[in-house]
Image: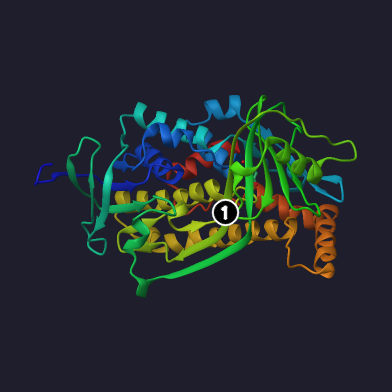
């Protein structure tokens, strides 16, 4: 290895090539702002990571309004509602009727493929497979990121701003010292057992099922591959379950009154932990955190990617103001603006979780009260509107009218569905 690092510079150093980092780099490039994205992982690993599949209306608008809509509109599916099942009966929540908005089913790894392809086609710098990443001098005007490239070259990347988009296990969040931060953490006593199965869809829309045996969620990926989850112990060993035991558990929670799951071979399985985390503030000097680097939500309601994209929409508008107009005002307010949405999403994800999961400690009163809550949400316009508004996503904050973000969202709002 060389003892002198290769020195290079850019305007925004982006640590992490997940949804937050790639979306930021994509939006900045449309606005003529340079960035370099680095990630520890290889491109193939990033493109194969299975996560949730629901895109809020605002995420869809931002993608379609910035040239990322082709595959999303052709292969993704617009979903105008979900079913909530309890006591064996499904009740539908109709999103457009309640909010005028909808969601798209389009898996996160497909979003990542589109983002990576767009960055590379535009000549963007995305460095995969780097190692030994560290961030420096974040409280100065010339922060730096140091790392080793895949070929072993040490690099010192100086920049004006570092975007920390390296997820919940990343290094950037550790650059905020203990005295300058508050960490909010909540662990849930549940996990999700997730499977991919080769089978036709069981339902045209997602089914969120409450049952005495626990929660289950029936989602989809393609016409031939389905995604399903059921509540389990967070320490459950997925490998110890036979396929038949998995299907028996899903059937017991979901089937009944004319609803029957389409079953098939299980292609992939795993247990997902459920936790909520928020780091406050999302900024330290010239380091700005976005997405999972700053917060984690439990999977219920699929807010993770959408929250990352919403953070980036706010951060991009602030960076455009900073680089094009020389004002740091929107960078100053970034954390406040972004965290308003983060806490709404934390509440929504926690609320969906608590409404639909069985709690082994709950007494008879608690179990019966939960059914009352589900009835209230699904049978009242006010209750279901609250769910539909949060599920389809709150509007993305407009802070900079000259931003590519504002332009994209306005263009999409004028487009027919
Ligand atoms: C999916 C995951 C979720 O957590 C959710 O609420 C909806 C859908 C999914 O993987 O498809």
On the image, the x and y values in percent for residue 37 come to 32, 42
Decide if residue 134 is on the left or right side of residue 405: left
On the image, the x and y values in percent for residue 320 come to 36, 48
Q: Nearer the viewer, residue 129 or 83?
A: 129
On the image, the x and y values in percent for residue 64 come to 53, 33
Ligand 1 lies in which image quarter?
A: top right
Q: Residue at x 23, y 56 (%)?
A: 143
Decide if residue 167 is on the left or right side of residue 145: right
Q: Nearer the viewer, residue 335 or 22?
A: 22
Q: Is residue 406 visible?
A: yes
Report the number of numbered marks.
Answer: 1
Look at the image and tell me in which quarter the C terminus lies. Answer: top right
On the image, the x and y values in percent for residue 395 come to 59, 50
User: Hey, which quadrant is residue 92 in on the image?
Assistant: top right
Vertical order, 312 against 279 (above or below): above
Q: Residue at x 25, y 53 (%)?
A: 160
Vertical order, 46 against 225 (above or below): below
Q: Residue at x 42, y 62 (%)?
A: 282
Q: Secondary structure at mark 1?
A: strand
Vertical order, 228 against 213 (above or below): above
Q: Which residue is mark 1?
A: 273
Decide if residue 292 is on the left or right side of residue 105: left
């Amino acid at each position: 290895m060389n003892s002198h690092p290769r020195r290079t510079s850019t305007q925004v150093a982006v640590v992490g090539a997940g949804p937050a980092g790639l979306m930021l780099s994509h939006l900045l490039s449309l606005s003529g702002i340079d960035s370099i994205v680095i990630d520890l992982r290889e491109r193939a690993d990033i493109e194969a990571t299975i996560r949730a599949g629901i895109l809020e209306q605002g995420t869809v608008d931002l993608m379609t309004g910035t040239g990322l809509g082709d595959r999303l509109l052709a292969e993704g599916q617009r979903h105008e509602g979900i079913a909530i099942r309890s006591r064996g009966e499904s009740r539908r929540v109709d999103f457009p009727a309640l909010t005028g908005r909808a969601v798209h089913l389009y898996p996160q790894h497909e979003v990542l493929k589109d983002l990576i392809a767009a960055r590379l086609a535009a000549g963007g710098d995305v460095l995969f497979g780097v190692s030994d990443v560290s961030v420096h001098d974040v409280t100065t005007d010339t922060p730096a990121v140091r790392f080793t490239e895949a070929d072993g070259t040490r690099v010192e990347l100086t920049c004006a701003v570092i975007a920390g988009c390296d997820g919940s296990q990343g290094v950037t969040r550790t650059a905020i010292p203990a005295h300058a931060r508050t960490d909010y953490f909540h662990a849930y006593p549940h996990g999700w057992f997730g499977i991919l199965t080769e089978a036709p869809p069981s339902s045209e829309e997602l089914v969120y099922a409450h049952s005495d045996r626990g929660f289950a969620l029936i989602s989809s990926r393609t016409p031939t591959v389905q995604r399903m989850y059921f509540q389990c112990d967070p320490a459950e060993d997925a490998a110890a379950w036979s396929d038949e035991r998995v299907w028996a558990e899903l059937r017991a929670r979901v089937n009944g009154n004319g609803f029957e799951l389409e079953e098939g071979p299980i292609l992939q399985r795993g247990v997902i932990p459920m936790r909520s985390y928020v780091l406050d503030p999302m900024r330290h000097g010239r380091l700005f955190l976005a997405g999972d680097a700053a917060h984690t939500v439990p999977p219920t309601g699929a807010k993770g990617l959408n929250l990352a994209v919403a953070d980036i929409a706010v951060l991009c508008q602030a960076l455009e103001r900073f680089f094009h107009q020389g004002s740091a005002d929107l960078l100053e307010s970034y954390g406040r603006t972004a965290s308003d949405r983060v806490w709404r999403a934390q509440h929504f994800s926690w609320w969906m979780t608590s409404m639909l999961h069985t709690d082994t400690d709950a007494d008879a009163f608690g179990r019966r009260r939960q059914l009352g809550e589900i009835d209230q949400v699904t049978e009242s316009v006010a209750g279901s509107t609250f769910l539909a508004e949060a599920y389809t996503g709150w509007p993305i904050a407009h802070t900079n009218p000259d931003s590519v973000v504002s332009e994209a969202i306005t263009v999409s709002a004028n487009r027919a569905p």
